Amino acid sequence: MKYRHAWCTDNGGAPLSNDEIKRYITVRPSERQLKFNEMKYYNFIHFGVNTFMGREWGDGTEDLKVFRPSQLDTDQWCRILKNTGSEGIIFTAKHHDGFCLFDTAYTDHNVMNSPYGKDVVKELAKSCKKHGMKLGIYLSPWDRHEKTYGSDEYNDYFVNQLTELCTSYGDIFCFWFDGACGEGPDGRKQKYDWDRYYEVIRKHQPDAIIANCGPDVRWIGNEAGKTRKSEWSVIPWTDDTLDSIAEKSQKNEAHGIECFDRTDEDIASREKLQGKANLVWCPAEADVSINYGWFWQNDDYYKERSQSPCRTAKELADIYFNTVGGNASLLLNVPADKNGLINPRERKVLKEFTKIIEDTFRENMPYDLSLVSPEGEECVPGTDSFMMQNDEAAIRLRPNGKFRTLVIEEDIRYSQRVESFSLFADGKHVKDCTCIGACRILRFPKGLDADEVDILITQSRSNPIIKSIRLYK
């Protein structure tokens, strides 16, 4: 089969190489971003006074006597989540209510003054190390308890606590900041000193990712696990980028996770990048909860709202395939209950979800690989990570039987290049796709049975560089 309209002959009508394209592909991930990208899937754990108050947001006036988990077991958290394939846990060290689940010298509104009386972050750090999990920290910039909120003094307070967390709990793989910014005493609004916060983290935890309201990983724009058709990691960065994230972030606890979606479809096409002075590598992260809330609530809470407590295992699996398989990472929230455990209700869904993922990737399908020129001539690439040259039009796979899943990855050390590609089976068109990036997962529930499967790169920013292709039965 010959390909006259391959990327190397007309590149979909777009320039293959010029000064602007060279500028795009020189934007590449840092070492910390590359290491982070290898994780792909990890977990949130929301836990705090809200768990015991039956609400999503506290106001900072909670009596600390309510925080009394009877069976808190951070080892259980790590065992259960690691069994789902997760490699890390980001924990709510402080939510908007200002209650700190760590031993801090800067406020009495902390776990040491509750009936529980132990540093939960410290316990989780030990469990993560024991079970080979990475520890991340969520520290809410908004603090509805702290009296200095809304003043320059509050930035000192926040930096002091951030320094405690950076220096007292071992390696932290991620600091996660949301954009919530409510009013403080007397209606004052806080101006967050992001640059100063970042400086503290870079000094004490240089390998840590700063996510969401941060320079390393960006919020995907919704809390429903929805990805864009084309998810790009090379994006424009302006002075108001963080303000824009905060503006679109949560404003009140009644927004509802399922319907919350402010995803701009196109943020980084060629047209969007054209002429933008400051381009950065900042991949997308999708944060979504196993429940229809962030903190654990009992069944009655959801009955009153005519909601199901948990997403189904299939819903979670679809979110996994669309995020991890759509050039984004998945941050799945699994809250702890009032006992301080991952509840049987959530454990059941996690077990079913894990089985779907494991079954999908259980059996690897062998295949022969070659690169095809527009004239139909074939050659075998010499390395696992290969660059397609200007006389190569398609990637040809000869699978050893029927397969149901195809995974293709670009070598993002050389930026993100592929803008679109098409799939053919024995010469018949199967599917058109857009960008690839770190990972693209294509599923065929009924299976794809063909002697030859061709991946035709139809448009790219310079020569595509493919890291790996995997087929699963």
Image: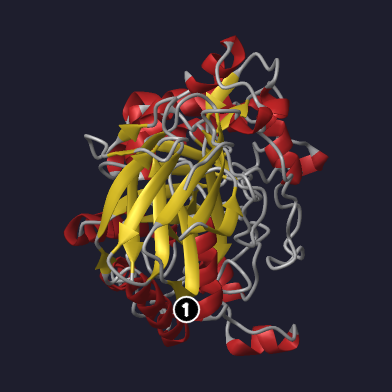
Q: Which residue lies furthest to the left in this view?
A: 130
Secondary structure beneath disc 1?
A: loop
User: Residue, x 36% and y 38% (percent of image)?
Assistant: 377
Residue name at image x 78 percent, y 36 percent: 188
The residue positioned 71% from the left and 32% from the top of the image is 243
Q: In which quarter of the image is residue 175?
A: top left
How many tags in the picture? 1
Camera-nearest residue between 150 and 10: 10
Closer to us: 256 or 192:
256
Q: Where is residue 309 in the image (x, y as percent from the top left)?
A: 60, 82
State left or right for residue 45 relative to residue 207.
right
> In front: 243, or 275?
275
Whether residue 86 is visible to the viewer of this picture, yes or no, is no
Percent of width and height locating residue 203: 35, 23
Q: In this picture, is 430 found above or below 415? A: below
Residue receiving disc 1 = 338
Q: Please name the residue shown 57% across and 18% down the image.
A: 21
